[in-house]
Image (cartoon, rainbow, N blue to C red):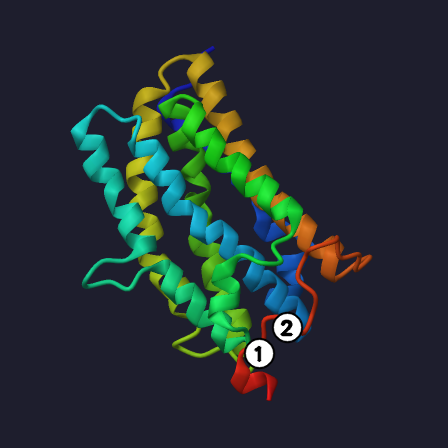
Amino acid sequence: MTQTRQEFEARLRRIGVERYHDLHPFHRLLHGGGCTRDQVQAWVINRYYYQSRIPMKDAAFMSRVEDPKLRRAWRSRIEDHDGTAENEGGIVRWLRLAEAVGLDPDYVASEVGILPATKFAVDAYVRFVREKTLLEAVASSLTELFAPKIHAERIEGLLKNYDFANDASMSYFRKRLTEAPKDVAFGLAWVLDHADTQEKQDAAANALIFKTDVLWAQLDALHSAYVEPARIPPGAWLPGEGQALARAS
């Protein structure tokens, strides 16, 4: 049976309550100050791969959209990450965080040492958005419903527990506190408008579940490689590699 608009929105929000990656042990370790410098660096390196692919994902989505209004609404997502003449963009801010934790930003941007599971998960997300229906593609972005909470917790936890955390290094997360609500307000309304049958509602919900799985899988890979059992796969980043010269001297 097709759910009402209110029932379906509640269903989507429950997915975040039950499956969002703020529940993952790695994030709890990170936000609580329990990560070593090496573990923080591993997180920054691997998360960069996800950050760098977000505008590519959005560009793949826009290439399939025939409605100019939808393309105009979606375009700002690419600008938020890639930047504009007035806005340096999320990727640059992430590389500033990389430098703050002692990494060479050029090394991070080279994508050398990314965990295989990180690549598989993120590439699967880009492929999902490129190949699935527009409804499923938009629905998969709705993890942004839950992002402001994790960003706020991350800012508080990192500032409290790590010397590298300051206004400059936290700029990515602070900016997302205003960018994400704008994006999700549009995306949520679009999904609720277009998921007008049970089949479409199920597809949209499953797309959001898929995206939570993508985020969770990345943290599973980090935890396995750098926390427990600390089994780093061949070719992945090894602690001590890619250090900023100022920090390595």
- Relative placement, left or right, of 97 versus 185 is right
Q: Quadrant of the C terminus?
A: bottom right
Can residue 137 be seen here? The reply is yes
Residue 216 appears at what percent x and percent y? 62, 45
Judged from the image, the secondary structure of the residue bearing numbered disc 2 is: loop
Q: Which is more toward the observer, 23 or 234?
A: 234
Q: What is the count of numbered marks?
A: 2
Asked if disc 1 and disc 2 are in contact, CB closer than 8 Å, the reply is yes
Residue 91 appears at what percent x and percent y? 39, 59
Give the residue at x 51% y 73%.
104
Q: Residue furthest right?
A: 229
- Relative placement, left or right, of 51 versus 185 is right
Judged from the image, the secondary structure of the residue bearing numbered disc 1 is: loop
What residue is disc 1 on? 162
Q: What amino acid type should be assigned to the residue bearing mark 1?
A: Tyr
Give the residue at x 64% y 60%.
28
- Relative placement, left or right, of 6 versus 20 is left
What residue is disc 2 on? 33
Alpha-carbon distance for marks 1 and 2? 7 Å
Badge 1: how crowded within 10 Å, few (<14), some, or many (20+)?
Answer: some
